[in-house]
């Protein structure tokens, strides 16, 4: 598997590996809306790449910088998730895959883990291969369960380690440092494996102009003026539940054992702010939020 390239990677072997990133696009925190069914309205709310997923994306891009190989982004969500895929491509991602189907609407973490693992299997990743590693964020701002990476790993039959801050490839294993209460822990994981990247890992880099120019020729605007991939773009694959051969009873609301009891509306709290100094009360700022 390794090949030699002493000019660019003088201190490392260049690996023909895929660094797969599970990336989620989430509504901006102040823009979250809940449907009548108790699920998040992902199609209309302004959204962005989930913060923890950005750390996973940066980790994968850094591994590619060090060792070579490819970075592949895989997501599940509505078509507008392509916006985040385009952002990822502008940072240096090589290929993106989006599983998008109305049948998946309302999927909880169990159904999402099943669907994402099925997608990974469909595009060729399996526990029998040792030339890939999958990375995800610790959790998402719209769910905060931290369940999906573990469920993807379980469905694929591969090991997982959480809260990873650094990693390196050594032979057929990944050596990682993960944060624990009061310190850190060094572990060696066999390939393939699932890494949940800690929010204390490196932040996502800015746009790579060379990559952005290359991506631009594959991008157009949809009816709402949003960026979307052109039909047949070789760097992007759009898959349906039928393409991946997912079992109907295991996806969407029907395949989700989680029950939303209530989704109360949260009102902003407002109070007066008292400003003081050593001499006592100076004044009151009304309506501070």
Image (tube, helix red, strand yellow):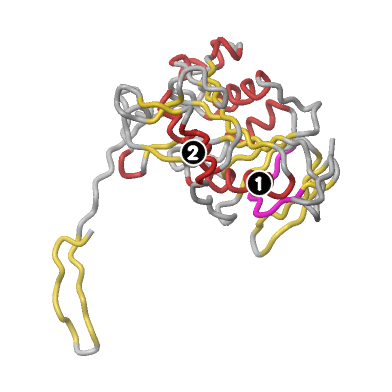
Residue 4: % across, % down? 84, 44
Q: Secondary structure at mark 2?
A: helix
Q: Is residue 284 left or right of residue 126?
A: left
Which residue is at the front of the view, 287 or 221? 221
Give the Cα separation between the discs numbered 1 and 2: 35 Å
Location of the C terminus by quadrant is: bottom left
Please tell me how crowded label 1 is: few (under 14), some (14-19), or many (20+) other residues with Cα within 10 Å.
many
Against 163, is 244 above or below?
above
Quadrant in the rendering for residue 137: top right
Q: Is residue 31 left or right of residue 133?
A: left
Q: Residue at x 59, y 55 (%)?
A: 201
- Outermost residue on the bottom side: it is 279
Q: Is residue 169 magenta?
A: no
- Which residue does the numbered mark 2 point to in the structure image? 213
Q: Is residue 160 magenta?
A: yes
Q: Residue at x 74, y 36 (%)?
A: 17
Residue 80: % across, % down? 40, 27
Which residue is at the front of the view, 41 or 9? 9
- Which residue does the numbered mark 1 point to in the structure image? 162
Which residue is at the front of the view, 218 or 179? 218
Residue segment shown in magenta: 159-168
Q: Residue at x 33, y 34 (%)?
A: 263
Against 86, is 13 above or below?
below
Quadrant in the rendering for residue 30: top left
Which of disc 2 and disc 1 is earlier in sequence?
Answer: 1
Q: Secondary structure at mark 1?
A: strand
């Amino acid at each position: 598997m390794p090949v030699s390239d002493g000019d660019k990677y003088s201190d490392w072997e260049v690996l023909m590996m895929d660094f797969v990133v599970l990336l989620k696009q989430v509504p901006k925190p102040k823009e979250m809306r809940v449907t009548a069914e108790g699920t998040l309205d992902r199609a209309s709310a302004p959204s962005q790449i989930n913060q923890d997923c950005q750390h996973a994306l940066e980790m994968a891009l850094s591994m590619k910088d060090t060792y070579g190989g490819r970075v592949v982004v895989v997501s599940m969500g509505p078509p507008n998730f392509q916006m985040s895929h385009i952002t990822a491509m502008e940072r240096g991602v090589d290929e993106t895959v989006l599983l998008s189907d109305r049948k998946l609407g309302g999927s909880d973490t169990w159904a999402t883990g099943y669907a994402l693992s099925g997608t990974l299997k469909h595009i060729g990743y399996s526990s029998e291969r040792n030339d890939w590693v999958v990375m995800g964020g610790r959790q998402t701002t719209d769910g905060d369960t931290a369940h999906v990476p573990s469920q993807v790993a379980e469905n694929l039959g591969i090991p997982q380690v959480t809260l990873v801050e650094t990693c390196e490839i050594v032979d057929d294993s990944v050596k990682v440092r993960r944060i624990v209460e009061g310190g850190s822990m060094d572990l060696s994981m066999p390939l393939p494996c699932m890494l949940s990247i800690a929010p204390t890992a490196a932040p996502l880099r800015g746009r790579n102009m060379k990559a952005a120019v290359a991506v631009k020729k594959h991008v157009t605007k949809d009816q709402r003026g949003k960026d979307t991939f052109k039909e047949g773009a070789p760097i992007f694959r759009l898959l349906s539940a039928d393409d991946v051969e997912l079992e109907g009873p295991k996806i969407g609301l029907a395949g989700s054992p989680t029950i939303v009891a209530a989704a109360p509306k949260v009102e902003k709290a407002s109070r007066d702010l008292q400003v003081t100094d050593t001499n006592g009360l100076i004044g009151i700022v009304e309506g501070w939020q």
